[in-house]
C-alpha cells in the first residue's frame, strides 16, 4: 500500500474536480481493500486522516486553501464527501472484526454435551416425612418441633414414665455425661421419641391443640435390617373438648388411606404406652397383597404400622401445672406416633434400613 502523492489541480471546473476526487476515492478504496489486521488499519488511518501528514490534510491545504474563492464551495463539498468515504472505509475495516481463520480457531462446538450439574432431590426419608405431615396439615394440624437433646422430665417423667418405671427400659438412650449433681428430671439425654414436644406445646398454649411433630429420635437399639439407633418419627396430638376414641380411629383411618391408597383398611388392637390410656396398635391391610397374605405380611394380610391412644390424664396433669385449662375433667385428646423409615421402606420397597443412611448416590438416585 503506497499511495501516490497528491497531484496539483489542473483546473477548477466540475469535470476536472470530479476526476481528481474520484481518483483519490478509488485510491482510498484500493488501500482499504488490502487491510489485514489492526496495525494495517491504523496505518491506513494515519495515512488518510492523520492531522499533520494525512492525505486529506494535504488535499485540504493544496487544493482547498489555495483555490480561487469562486471554486472553494465546490471543492469543499467534494472534500467533505471524500472524507466521509474514507471514514466509512475505516469503520468497515475496524468493524469487520477478527478474520475467519481466527474465528474458526476459537469456535465452540455447541453440539458437544455440556458439564452436567446434578439436580438436588429430596431424600426418601424427608419426602415420606413431608407426605405424612401434609396429610395432617390438610386436616388442620400445625407442625411442632423441639430439641433433640432433651431433659429427663420432658422425655420421660412428663410423658408418665416415672423414675424407675420399667417402661423406661424399652426406650434406653444415650445420656449427656457428668450430670450427677443435677436432679434426675433436669438431666439431659438424646430424646427417644418426639413426644416431649407434646408437653412443650401444651405448656405454651391452652387447648385446642392439633399438632404433628416430625423429628429425629435416638434409642439404644442394635442396628439390623429394620432397626437403627437413630430414626425419625411423626407424632400427633389432638386435644379439645369431647375428643373420643372414634375421632382417633377416624383420623388415623383417613391418614392411612391418604398415605397408602383408599382401599387400605385399618384395625386397632389393645396395647400399652405410658402416656396414653387406653392405648392401641394400628394395623393396616397389607399393601403388597391386598390382605390375601404374602411373605411381607407373614401371611396374615395385615401390617402393624403405628401406636396410638387417648392421652393419659396423668400427662394432662403435668401440662396443667403451667396451663390450668388442661383439666382432664373438661378436655380430652388423643396421640399417635409412627416411624418414618418404616413407612418409607414400605412405600419404596426398601429392605435394608441402613441403605437410607449410607449416602450411596446409586441407591438414592433411584428416588430422585
Ligand atoms: Zn401381604
Image: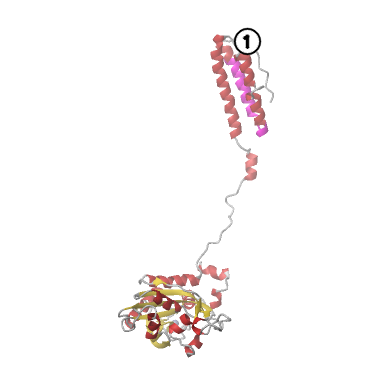
Residue 104 visible, this orientation: yes
Task: Identify the residue shown where x is 58% and y is 10%.
Answer: 12
Look at the image and say whether residue 28 sits in the magenta stretch. Answer: yes
Q: Give the camera-side residue of 189 and 90.
A: 189
56, above or below 103, in the image: above
Count of numbered circles on the image = 1
Question: Which residue is outermost to the front?
Answer: 181
Look at the image and give the residue range highlighted in magenta: 18-39
Q: Give the camera-side residue of 79 and 89.
A: 79
Q: Position of residue 59 (x, y in %)?
A: 62, 17
13, above or below 127, in the image: above
Q: Is the stretch drawn in magenta largely helix, strand or loop? A: helix
* Ligand 1 shown in quarter: bottom left
Task: Identify the residue shown where x is 39% and y is 85%.
Answer: 314
Q: Position of residue 104 (x, y in %)?
A: 63, 43
45, above or below 102, in the image: above
Q: Give the camera-side residue of 278 and 56.
A: 278
Q: Is residue 286 left or right of residue 189?
A: left
Q: Secondary structure at mark 1?
A: loop
Q: Is mark 1 within 8 Å of ligand 1?
A: no
Label 1 Cα neighbours within 10 Å, binned few <14 / some 14-19 / many ≥20: few
Residue 260 visible, this orientation: no
Q: Position of residue 311 (x, y in %)?
A: 38, 83
Q: Which residue is mark 1?
A: 10
Q: Quadrant of residue 325?
A: bottom left
Look at the image and say whether residue 144 sits in the magenta stretch. Answer: no
* Quadrant location, the N terminus: top right
Q: Quadrant of residue 72?
A: top right
Q: Position of residue 74 (x, y in %)?
A: 54, 14
Amino acid at each position: 500500500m503506497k499511495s501516490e502523492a497528491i497531484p496539483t489541480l489542473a483546473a477548477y471546473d466540475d469535470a476536472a474536480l470530479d476526476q481528481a476526487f474520484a481518483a483519490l476515492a478509488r485510491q482510498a478504496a484500493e488501500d482499504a481493500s488490502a487491510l489485514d489486521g489492526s496495525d494495517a488499519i491504523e496505518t491506513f488511518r494515519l495515512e488518510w486522516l492523520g492531522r499533520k501528514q494525512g492525505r486529506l490534510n494535504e488535499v485540504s491545504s493544496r487544493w482547498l486553501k489555495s483555490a480561487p474563492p469562486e471554486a472553494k464551495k465546490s471543492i469543499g463539498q467534494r472534500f467533505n464527501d471524500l472524507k466521509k468515504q474514507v471514514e466509512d472505509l475505516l469503520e468497515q475495516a475496524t468493524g469487520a472484526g477478527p478474520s475467519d481463520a481466527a474465528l474458526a480457531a476459537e469456535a465452540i462446538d455447541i453440539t458437544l454435551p455440556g458439564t452436567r450439574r446434578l439436580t438436588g432431590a429430596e431424600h426418601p426419608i424427608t419426602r415420606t416425612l413431608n407426605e405424612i405431615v401434609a396429610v395432617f396439615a390438610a386436616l388442620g394440624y400445625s407442625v411442632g418441633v423441639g430439641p433433640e437433646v432433651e431433659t429427663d422430665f420432658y422425655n420421660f417423667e412428663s410423658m408418665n414414665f416415672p423414675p424407675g418405671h420399667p417402661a423406661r427400659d424399652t426406650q434406653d438412650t444415650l445420656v449427656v455425661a457428668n450430670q450427677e449433681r443435677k436432679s434426675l428430671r433436669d438431666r439431659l439425654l438424646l430424646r427417644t421419641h418426639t413426644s416431649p414436644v407434646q408437653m412443650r406445646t401444651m405448656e405454651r398454649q391452652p387447648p385446642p391443640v392439633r399438632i404433628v411433630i416430625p423429628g429425629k429420635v435416638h434409642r439404644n437399639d442394635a442396628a439390623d435390617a429394620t432397626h437403627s439407633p437413630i430414626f425419625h418419627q411423626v407424632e400427633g396430638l389432638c386435644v379439645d373438648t369431647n375428643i373420643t376414641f372414634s375421632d382417633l380411629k377416624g383420623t388415623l383411618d383417613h391418614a392411612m388411606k391418604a398415605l397408602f391408597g383408599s382401599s387400605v383398611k385399618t384395625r386397632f388392637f389393645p396395647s400399652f404406652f405410658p402416656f396414653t390410656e387406653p392405648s392401641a396398635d394400628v394395623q393396616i391391610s397389607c399393601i403388597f397383597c391386598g390382605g390375601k397374605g404374602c411373605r411381607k405380611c407373614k401371611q396374615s394380610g395385615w401390617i402393624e404400622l403405628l401406636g396410638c391412644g387417648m392421652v393419659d390424664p396423668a400427662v394432662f396433669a403435668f401440662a396443667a401445672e403451667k396451663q390450668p385449662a388442661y383439666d382432664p375433667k373438661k378436655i380430652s385428646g388423643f396421640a399417635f406416633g409412627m416411624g418414618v423409615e418404616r413407612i418409607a421402606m414400605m412405600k419404596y420397597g426398601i429392605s435394608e434400613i441402613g441403605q437410607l443412611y449410607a449416602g450411596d448416590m446409586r441407591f438414592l438416585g433411584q428416588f430422585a
